[in-house]
Amino acid sequence: MPLGSTDRLGRRRFLRGAMAAPALLALEERLFATGNGPLEIESVEPIAIRTPRGEKPPDWYLEMGPVGQATGGSGLWNRLDHASPSRFRGVTQATLVKIVTRDGLVGWGECHAPAAPRVHAMVISDLLAPILIGQDARQVEPLWERLYSSQRLRGYATGFYTESIAGVDLALWDLLGKYLGQPLYRILGGKYRDSIPTYSGIRGRSPRELAESARRQMEVGFPAVKMGLSKGPGTSNIERVMAVSEAIGGTGQLLVDSLGAYKIHEARAVGARLDELSNIGWWEDALLPEDITGYTELKAALKTPLCAGETLSNRYQFRELFAARAVDMVNPDLCRAGGVSECRRIAVLADLHGVLFSPHISTGTALYWAASVHLAAHLPNTVIMEGGTLLERPFGNGLLREPLESRPGQAIVPERPGIGAEFDESVLERYRVA
């Protein structure tokens, strides 16, 4: 069906605006001549970026404890450490996806790629791009299913694979929004609010430093802050949480993240201490992600709400979590768990089970943040989202032609067509990984 006059007017305003280029003007003329022509995909380009840039061997960037590293403590608290993830010597990495149609329209996406961005680039260029070239970019969800099905019966359903699909998915939604001259939230079906509450992480070694960091974040406007609560000698780490909780008082909430540190018997003991604190918003990743039965037992034992999901990658994994009544809220990463298409399905499943939704954005670029804001605003069960200071980081607004708007404690929903985060490619070149 041809687009109506209102859609055409919106498209004209976009295409003739500050971002308009000759290729886009040519697209405008062709669309108005044909009504609603297809958007044939001409190229799919992955772009790995890193800051600080550097070009050292991959093993230089990777940091991880030695084989046999223990958790510390005495007695049964000293066991093998199975939860500490790899770190990357202070660098931030990402893999962007640039999809260009034959009419010259450009869509941008991003994969969650803190560890090895060139792996995602290879998956995209060698596996996903050949499936996409020549297809109609407007077929966003059918193309998602096509990509996912390409390796489904070979056992690929998580990790680099769904992270790479997520990058493509975001780029396709960005293209569709630009094609229609509408922001992403509108083509998803609308938004419930104009801004989304955000939380910020706090830093400090001592309880006193952490408490001061939390106070500062509350004073500038954040409704909640997050800190780590990891394994250690007995339950001594809880003293740090108690100091921050006391510093916050009734001015906001404290979110606690354990990165899968505990076994169920340990988590019961630590959780009992958390239950004594009235301002704990959630306990995140208390157990390893595979231990769904453990989460169900822990949830039944505690008053403190449980949050999990950043480690999961598709709706089928989340289905098991929901069926077990294992958590109170989930926090998937859009750029890990299959993009906007899959995370919207996950959020609907969560809502069906009375579970709240909170996008997780521990790393990535301003595009990652903007796509998360759009989806969060579109969903009825969104409660808060991460990334409260992301736009101030090197991969934040500094990468964009036009900055995104935010303020402490609030992410403003972008109103530009598509995702609304247009990269300045001359700036991207400063960070591109060879």
Image (cartoon, rainbow, N blue to C red):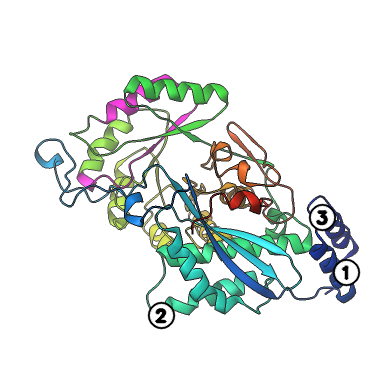
**Residue 415: horizontal and vertical position, in percent?**
74, 48
Q: Residues within 10 Å of mark 1 (few under 14, many from 20)?
A: few
Residue identifier under label 2: 153
The range drawn in magenta is 237-265
**Which residue is drawn at the image coordinates 88% and 59% (left, top)?**
6
Residue identifier under label 3: 14
Q: Nearer the viewer, mark 1 or mark 2?
A: 1
Tell which circle, 1 or 3, labels the residue nearer the N-terminal end.
Answer: 3
Q: Which mark is residue 90?
A: none
User: Is residue 176 in view?
Assistant: yes
Q: Is residue 78 above or below residue 102?
A: above
**Which residue is drawn at the image coordinates 54% and 36% (left, top)?**
389
Tell which circle, 1 or 2, labels the residue nearer the N-terminal end.
Answer: 1
Q: Residue type at mark 1?
A: Glu
Q: Residues within 10 Å of mark 2 (few under 14, many from 20)?
A: few
Residue contact at pointers 2 and 3, CB within 8 angstroms: no
Q: Residue type at mark 3?
A: Phe
Query: In terms of secondary structure, where does tag 2 sit?
Result: loop
**Residue 38: horizontal and vertical position, in percent?**
75, 76
**Left or right: where 267 falls relative to 278:** left
Mark pair 1, 2: CA separation: 43 Å
